[in-house]
Amino acid sequence: MIYGVDTFTIADVMTILGDSGKAKLNKEAKQKILKSQHNVQQIVASDRTVYGINTGFGPLCDVKISEEETAQLQHNLIISHAVGVGKPISKDLSKVMIITKIHALSKGFSGVSLEVIERLILLLKKDIIPAVPEQGSVGASGDLAPLAHLVLPVLGLGKVWDNDEVKNAAEILAKHEIEPLQLGPKEGLGLINGTQFILAHAILGLDHFGYILDLADLTAAMSLEAYRGSASPFKKELHDIRPFDGSKHVASRMRKFLKNSENLASHEYCDRVQDPYSMRCVPQVHGASRNAFEHLKNLTETELNSVTDNPIILSAEESISGGNFHGQLLALPLDYATLAAAELGNISDRRSYLLLEGKYGLPRLLTESSGLNSGYMIPQYTSAALVTENKTLCFPASADSIPTSLGQEDHVSMGSISGRKFNQVLGNLENILAVELMFGAQGLEFRRPAKCTKYVESAYSLIRSKVPKLENDRLIGEDILAICDMIRARKFEVN
């Protein structure tokens, strides 16, 4: 992908993540960057006072900095702001931070030099990825601490990933014969002022969430087959008269997954009037989560193509000190999406529970010899624990604000926490769905010889390739992990 094109999509970011060699600046982007750098140089040479170029930062914005001190000012900014704590975020998250930071800087409103931006691209291509602590950003004034850690290696400082280990950046840079750079006016501020920590969590979370949404539909279809529920609640006519996009889409997918099922047809004229909500309301519940996904995706791609640092350099004569760094625009939809993801787990656990009840031809706890054997009793405890953990993670971080910077930054978004919680919930959701898939496959054993649709049979076969039918009690924790590994590797055919 080429930086400098008008827009990037999440798919474009994922392409660069998979092949960093595709990242480069086009001619137009280079011209914009050079022009912006020239504008900053003119401001420095003039007598005008512009925040962050020839002043201190935050509450020190009234302290004038001499032209001779501007380079030291930017260096000090980076090292003083690199105060994140906690374990490092994943290497992929750090890479997405670099990818999105380069894209924002390439628009030519930040005053960061071509040399520094090309250094970021070089680090990306050589897989010298900074180690960024997960905690320390309040999500306004930009993700200051995480971004400071992200750019420390440009100065020859900080830590970077070396395969699966974290090592001193100086050691790895020396190995590649890469010399540290000295920052010029405005460059430190342009590098650490922005929302790329929040944005990276949103991008990778959305990529993850999209697959999980599709898998949840397939998982529900398998549970419905095991339960021998009704496919009538997914009829098109029902959803045309309440036409939310998400529920219409899920209903369509459920019809596809269940069409011409020999198993469901075998009880078409039974005396059961209707199924419990967790089976019957899949389109409405999963569909609501899909609506949240689409909302976050739309806003994330807007943020991806935005300039989020401060001040914005429009020309040598005009700069604007504004608030494009404020993370509220992503914090709120991230909190919404976190709730939407948690609800997928909530309804999944209810379907798992139904399969254990011993109704409609299924044995209690999905084992024919319960009593001596506990069967699948306890995996539902695991599911329930994860569902409740997710509920506790649904408190919106964006509902809180603690003033910082001696009151200069008196309202902050906490969007970094929103992004982290979103991804935590998705990780728990994988395990919740793994439990339901395990139960669904076991339930199908009691519906044989009737066959399900090709989609459900394919998922069943994949599970059975690693997880045998449960006959008597055995170590089944490893079965959950095996199915979860399949989910993470995206082995299930969900479309």
Image: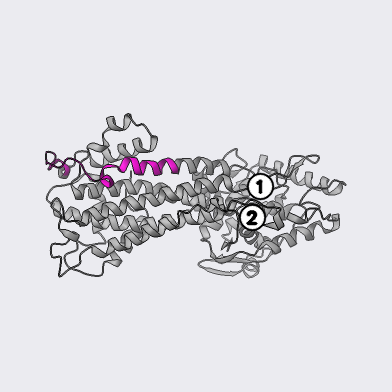
Splitting the image into 4 quarters, where does residue 355 fall? bottom left
Q: Is residue 461 above or below residue 42?
A: below
Task: Judge depth for marks 2 and 1 and give the one in front.
Answer: 1
Q: Nearer the viewer, residue 388 or 479?
A: 388
Splitting the image into 4 quarters, where does residue 95 fall? bottom right
Q: Nearer the viewer, residue 275 or 64?
A: 275
User: Are circles 2 and 1 on residues that touch, CB within 8 Å?
Assistant: yes
The kind of secondary structure element at disc 2 is helix
Give the labeled residue for mark 2.
Answer: 120
* Circle on res. 78: none
Q: Which residues are magenta?
A: 264-292
Circle count: 2
Q: Nearer the viewer, residue 146 or 410?
A: 410
Give the image's coloring scheme: one colour
Hey, what amino acid is under mark 2?
Answer: Leu
Quadrant of the rendering where the N terminus is positioned? top right
Q: Residue at x 75, y 55 (%)?
A: 59
Q: Residue at x 62, y 50 (%)?
A: 101
265 within the magenta span: yes
* Neighbourhood count class around disc 1 (C-alpha, 10 Å): few under 14, some 14–19, many 20 upward: many
444 within the magenta span: no
Give the labeled residue for mark 1.
Answer: 105
Q: Residue at x 19, y 49 (%)?
A: 227
In the rendered view, does 103 fall on the left or right side of 114?
A: left
In the rendered view, does 407 fall on the left or right side of 399?
A: right
Q: Position of residue 373 (x, y in %)?
A: 17, 68
Hey, what amino acid is under mark 1?
Answer: Leu
Q: Is residue 490 above or below residue 299?
A: below
Q: Position of residue 87 (x, y in %)?
A: 53, 66
The kind of secondary structure element at disc 1 is helix
Q: Nearer the viewer, residue 472 or 153?
A: 472
Quadrant of the rendering where the C terminus is positioned? top left
